[in-house]
């Protein structure tokens, strides 16, 4: 089993390119400072203006491209990568210029924040499209492996002299991961429903996708809000930023390896709302004690929040990619909507933290107000994400679970048509008839996903493509795509063969 998980870490162009992008992006997005730029230009005013401009642009670009994908504005992959690279290069050019033009460092930092925020958001969406367009196994494997290698690349950057790194990023690293995006995009099958369907002709599909995303997006947004609060404090103390970056990347490495191992050995199901419920008591307790601690505590609070934030980013991309595959929703729409909510709340937290810091009332007042605001939003998002307003548990969790199906082991025994029922085969209840049990056995044997099992169940019951699309809130093209993939996995070629195979269980 360990060897199986280890094999999944074998790098390829996509994995290494994405890892390099994440490592470079971590130098300016997650922490409170730029670890590879001179500290003399990283004043509180410059850093505040830079991060505000950057995060606002990320929110704007995520939201705008989500809207554009819904309106089916077609963007060529090569043109998108060229535009994103040019903008990203411009951002680092402004930052490097600020090292020499001290009198204009503030204006250059703001311009750098605008360009880097726009370029980063575009690259995130381009990578998301690459991962979502692939098969579930390949897309998840490359995504998780990319996060693991990103941490190693980031730590390796500290081996390079600081003055050199600032130039290597736009001149060497940027062209490399931009080329990796182009190579990955060449293998995208744009005939898939997530790209070929007209969103406005499948409004109910996109509405269903929004209903599946917004609760978990708010939960992730609550953590982003708190991260924005502590970032406003971190920019006043550069030592916090270095700790934030190091711990964030270290936590991302551990989390990605753990998820990869569990997926490859046992299979894994993750739910962002349920995970938020688990960490909620820890986060809210950490903020409660904030007013009663010394300054050193805020360092670890900020580092812990951004570590959680970086892990949440990995899970967010996995969930949005799964929704794109299962529902046929454009990856730009799914991840753009999620990212817009998350970064919007992060911006609110960042601005709120800055306003709190400017309020009069003594040394203790900012920490007290920060804790109160954070606790209030955490509790509010917990309530919204937990309460079932329509008294339907199925709708509450529908589409929120990230399903990582364990790979099929070679040499697995084939089902026997005349096999005797096991002792644990109880008579089918009202909720699960015999056919449902047979489909469940088929799912376990061939390691189908939940959505694929749902399609099989509806097909063998005699439902038409249109009826299946109606029941699952997906387009007819998406149903046909799922059916084609199911036939390939099960090695059948027509509906009757599928029915006969299910009957063997």
Image (spheres, helix red, strand yellow):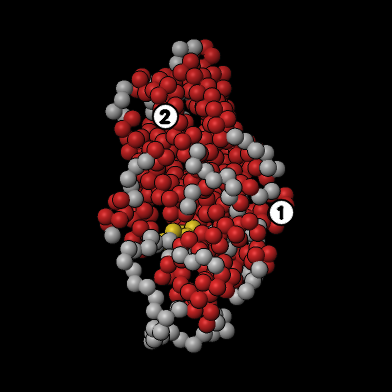
In the image: residue 150, left or right of residue 426? left
Residue located at (54% from left, 27% from top): 82
Residue located at (56% from left, 18% from top): 107
- Labels 1 and 2 touching (C-beta < 8 A): no
Residue located at (43% from left, 65% from top): 447
In the picture shown, does residue 100 fall above or below 465?
above
In the picture shown, does residue 156 fall above or below 292?
above
Mark 2 closeness class: few <14, some 14–19, many ≥20 residues within 10 Å: some
In the image: residue 404, left or right of residue 70? left
Quarter of the image for residue 207 reads bottom right
Q: Give me the disc on residue 176.
A: 2
Q: Nearer the viewer, residue 188 or 267?
A: 188
Q: Is residue 118 visible?
A: no
Which residue is the site of mark 1?
A: 203
Q: Secondary structure at mark 1?
A: helix
Quarter of the image for residue 247 reads top left
Task: Measuring from the top left, give residue 193's x and y in whole percent.
Answer: 61, 51
Task: Measuring from the top left, give residue 245's x and y in whole percent.
Answer: 39, 37
């Amino acid at each position: 089993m360990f060897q199986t998980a280890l094999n999944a870490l074998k790098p390829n162009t996509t994995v290494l390119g994405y890892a390099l992008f994440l490592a470079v992006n971590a130098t300016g997005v997650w922490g409170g400072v730029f670890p590879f730029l001179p500290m003399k230009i990283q004043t509180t005013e410059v850093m505040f203006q830079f991060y505000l401009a950057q995060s606002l642009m990320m929110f704007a670009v995520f939201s705008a491209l989500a809207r554009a994908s819904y309106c089916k504005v077609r963007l060529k992959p090569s043109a998108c990568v060229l535009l994103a690279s040019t903008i990203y290069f411009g951002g680092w050019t402004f930052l490097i210029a600020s090292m020499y033009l001290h009198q204009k460092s503030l204006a250059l930092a703001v311009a750098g924040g605008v360009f880097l925020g726009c370029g980063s958001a575009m690259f995130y969406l381009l990578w998301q499209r690459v991962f979502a367009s692939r098969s579930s196994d390949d897309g998840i494997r490359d995504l998780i492996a990319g996060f693991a290698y990103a941490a190693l690349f980031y730590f390796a950057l500290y081996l390079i002299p600081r003055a050199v790194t600032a130039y290597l990023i736009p001149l060497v690293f940027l062209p490399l991961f931009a080329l990796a995006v182009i190579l990955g995009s060449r293998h995208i099958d744009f005939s898939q429903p997530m790209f070929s369907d007209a969103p406005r002709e499948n409004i109910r599909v996109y509405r269903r996708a929004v209903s599946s995303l917004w609760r978990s997006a708010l939960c992730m947004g609550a953590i982003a809000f708190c991260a924005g609060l502590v970032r406003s404090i971190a920019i006043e103390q550069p030592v916090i930023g270095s700790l934030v970056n190091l711990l964030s990347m270290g936590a991302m490495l551990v989390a990605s390896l753990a998820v990869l191992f569990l997926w490859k050995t046992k299979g894994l199901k993750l739910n962002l709302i349920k995970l938020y419920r688990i960490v909620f008591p820890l986060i809210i307790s950490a903020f409660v004690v904030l007013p009663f601690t010394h300054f050193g505590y805020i360092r670890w609070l900020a580092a812990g929040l951004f570590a959680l934030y970086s892990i949440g980013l990995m899970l967010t991309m996995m969930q949005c990619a799964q929704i794109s595959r299962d529902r046929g929703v454009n990856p730009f729409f799914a991840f753009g909507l999620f990212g817009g909510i998350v970064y919007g709340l992060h911006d609110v937290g960042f601005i709120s933290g800055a306003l709190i810091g400017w309020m009069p009332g003594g040394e203790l007042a900012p920490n007290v107000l920060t804790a109160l605001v954070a606790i209030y939003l955490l509790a509010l998002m917990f309530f919204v994400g937990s309460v079932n307003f329509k008294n339907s548990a199925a709708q509450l969790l529908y589409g929120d679970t990230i399903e990582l199906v364990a790979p099929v082991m070679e040499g697995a025994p084939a089902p026997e048509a005349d096999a005797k029922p096991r002792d644990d085969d109880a008579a089918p209840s009202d909720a699960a008839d015999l056919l449902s049990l047979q489909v469940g056995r088929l799912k376990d044997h061939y390691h189908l996903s939940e959505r694929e099992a749902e399609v099989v169940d509806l097909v063998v019951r005699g439902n038409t493509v249109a009826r299946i699309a109606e029941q699952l809130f997906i387009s007819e093209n998406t149903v046909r795509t799922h059916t084609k993939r199911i036939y390939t996995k099960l090695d059948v070629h027509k509906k009757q063969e599928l029915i006969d195979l299910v009957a063997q269980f």
